[in-house]
Image: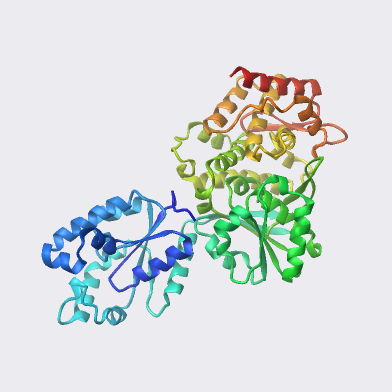
Amino acid sequence: MRGMNLPNIVLTGFMGTGKTTVGRLLAERLGLKFVDTDLLIEARDGRSVSNIFREAGEEVFRRLEAAVAQELAEEHGLVIATGGRLMLDSQNALALQKNGRVVCLVAEPEEIVRRLAGDTQRPLLNVSDPKKQVNQLLQARAARYGRFPQITTSGKSPETVADEIIRYLGESNLIRLPVTHPQGSYDVLVGEWLLPRLAELAGGGKPMAVVTDENVGAEYGRFCPPNTPLITIPAGEQHKNLETVRTIYNALIEAGIDRNSTIVALGGGVVGDIAGFVAATYLRGVRFVQCPTTLLAMVDASVGGKTGVDLPQGKNLVGAFKQPAIVIADLTTLVTLPLAEFRAGLAEVVKHGLIAAPSLFFRLENIDLPENLPLIPDLQSLVVRAITVKRNVVQADPFETGRRAVLNLGHTFAHAIEQVSGYTIRHGEAVAMGLVAAAALSAKLGFCSATLPGRIMAVLARLGLPVRIPADLSPKALLAAMNTDKKRVRGQMRFVLVRDVGDVFVTGDVPETAVLQVLHQQQIARDEN
């Protein structure tokens, strides 16, 4: 996993509590870089910590510690094992907490003494009675260590302690969104460092097989439990077809996956759709878990139970409803997304704001965008709010017999754009174009103000999304593709149109001439820009 933009994990605590040993293991488990502040100081100064104390004094060493703390506070994706006193200094603590999650490791005094027996490189323990010194120092530091969440290491292996830290990191800021459906309910988990707990969260005590694509598998496949079949398919919408489904069936049979097993979708919307369809049909249905790794999949595709694959004639023409047992949305996966993919997911967030969350839309209109979008302030709340819109709609209409159709805002245009482009345009990018086209059609038919399309276009453009349909996609070809869309009812194309932000409706009463005019105008406007 690339460390860029991930929060640091900072291990503090008294000497001998296992910070360095556990930190190295934790970094290896999570794919992050490990830094020991004492070792870093030694490498830069050219002297051991004990020699710095002896030759220059403790005050000099504390200045070196402070400089290292300020430096590491500006980095991301590190596991940092700190010296025993570093985080007791308030300025150091403030600096490292700015971009770090702090855990304090603790151990019984007797075990600390035992672990440090014979260690002559600890300047604060170079005394005649180390046990007495340990007890005195622990008592003096107890209140300041107590400011941080604590995990004991006494009597535990480093592997067990690393597991507990990962569980703490996941649970401490976890949000659970319950989703009900006619057959029961499931939770959508939104938080950090959830994939390392895949076996615990997704397994349900059952054997599992993980379906992923070649990109996601290379990044996150190592989080699969040991001996779990990892079925890797080619990445891209062009592979979302029945041939890929057949390949997965064959792999499941070869792996001995039975009806008591779980199929896990690890990836974006394409993987989720295919794996969900397989789970719905393999052996007449097996347990299914969604682990979305893209913003688009988290806020939209993974929730609601719709699965499907494409036919040459159109998108998602073959599918089934298959509700997941749980959805595990690990926000740490978003920092590894290419920027274009992250932006594509924001199109669905804009869509959900337009459907039923004006405050979400207003937030995107006014948000202070950082240079790197995955660092959007309070990304978790943005994701949760978007998921909540989807959750509320699908709960009210689980089988898309009525209200749920509003989730297709922009999608009649988007699916046609994808199909005619040969799926060279990302789904989220096509949705952005489709939202603008749907708003333009709404204004043309007199359903919304003439200014609303421009407002929607401005938000999408601000997020770095395309807002015009490519000029090489023929309006007539796009219209023909719309006429094969699965949303057609009694021969009529169905459109979701907009009255205002938070007020949308579904209609089939749209003249084809108006649709053609909007398609043409979108391309003309592109050419004029």
Measured along the vertical axis of the image, is residue 280 above or below residue 375? below
Q: Residue furthest top?
A: 528
Q: Position of residue 290 (x, y in %)?
A: 64, 56
Report the side of 317 relative to 10 (left or right).
Answer: right
Number of marks in the rendered image: 0
Q: Residue drawn 82% across and 40% down? A: 313
Q: Residue drawn 62% across and 24% down? A: 453
Q: Position of residue 490 (x, y in %)?
A: 88, 35
Q: Position of residue 255 (x, y in %)?
A: 72, 69
In the figure, residue 326 lies in which quadrant? bottom right
Report the side of 36 relative to 486 (left or right).
Answer: left
Q: Quadrant of the C terminus?
A: top right
Q: Residue furthest front?
A: 46
Task: Tell me if residue 369 can be seen.
Answer: yes
Task: Tell me if residue 182 can be seen.
Answer: no
Measured along the vertical axis of the image, is residue 528 above or below residue 241? above
Q: How is the image coloured?
A: rainbow
Q: Residue drawn 72% across and 53% down? A: 274
Q: Residue drawn 63% across and 50% down? A: 268
Between 238 and 330, the one nearer to me in the picture:
238
Measured along the vertical axis of the image, is residue 364 above or below residue 334? above
Q: Position of residue 9 (x, y in %)?
A: 39, 59
In the figure, residue 142 lies in which quadrant? bottom left
